[in-house]
Amino acid sequence: MRKSDYKKEIIRIIEFIRIELSKAGLSKLIIGLSGGIDSAVTTALSIKAIGKENVVAVMMPYKSSHPDSLKHAEQFAKILGIQYEIIDISSMVDAYFGNYALDAGILRKGNLMARERMCILYDLSAKYQALVAGTGNRSEMMVGYCTQYGDNACAFEPLGHLFKTEVREIARILEIPQSIIDKKPSADLWQEQTDEDELGITYDELDEILYELFDLRKTRKEMINKGFSKENIEKVLDLNKKSEFKRNIPAMMG
């Protein structure tokens, strides 16, 4: 895995946050605080950049979300001393599926939850005159593990250049609560959901494969010789290829 000076990286991100706010002529940020590591790190770095009085956190549980997610998010917001709101999205999501899509499976429901959360963040961004800070990381973006115009919609991505395992290292330096660092990564769309179960690969291995393939430009043969399984290499390449549309602006004819 690539070697990074995480303390210098923290300084770079803080400056990036300030620049993006300055370009927009705004002074506040609004963040969806899920109780997971990415949103916790984003929130902590935002406070370092612009002060806790300029950061608003929003927690948006669904009825099937794990109760620990809201508990950890609220506890963390109180530790930080920031303003926060709790908005239960269950009735909003259920109103659509209950009336118009009774046959919808879990994927469609999860996508609507992610988009409903982003609709709320953007509405509140108008209320607070704040930019929406993204909480995605490079690992998720590279394999498309996000909902288009849902959790990948934001004004800018403070952690978008960092692999998940790197976010974890920065979390330790920032002294994010251990309960958040240690929990299994999850989009929290239903209880017991985990990112790694859905992806079919651990973040440790995913990040190594992404780094070797896309940063070091290693071939499949070189990767296999280093001990990576052909199955996981092909899985990552396939996920990356199929999710390219999520990383690009909408295509237009010239």
Image (spheres, helix red, strand yellow):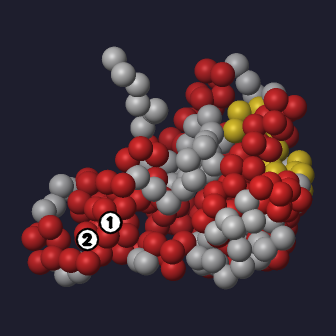
Residue 45 visible in the current orientation? no
x and y, in percent, of residue 50 in the image: 72, 37
Within 10 angstroms of label 1, few (less than 14), some, or many (20 or more) residues?
some
* Position in image of residue 160 (x %, y %): 49, 48
Mark 1 lies on residue: 236
Q: Is residue 92 left or right of residue 13?
A: right
Q: Dot 1 lies on which element?
A: helix
Residue 205 location (% of width, % of height):
36, 75
Quadrant hosting residue 100? bottom right
The residue to which callout 2 is attached is: 233
Q: Is residue 89 left or right of residue 234?
A: right
The amino acid beneath tag 1 is Val
Q: Is residue 24 above or below residue 234?
A: above
Badge 2: residue crowd in 10 Å (few <14, some 14–19, many ≥20)? some
Percent x, y for residue 165?
46, 67
- Horizontal side of residue 150 vs 72, given as left or right: left
User: Which one is in front, 72 or 82?
Assistant: 72
Q: Are marks 1 and 2 in contact (CB under 8 Å)?
A: yes
- How many labels sit on residues? 2
Quadrant in which residue 68 is drawn? bottom right
Quadrant where the C terminus is found in the figure: top left
Q: Residue at x 13, y 62 (%)?
A: 219
Specify the amino acid type for callout 2. Answer: Ile
In the displayed structure, 156 sits above or below 70; it is above
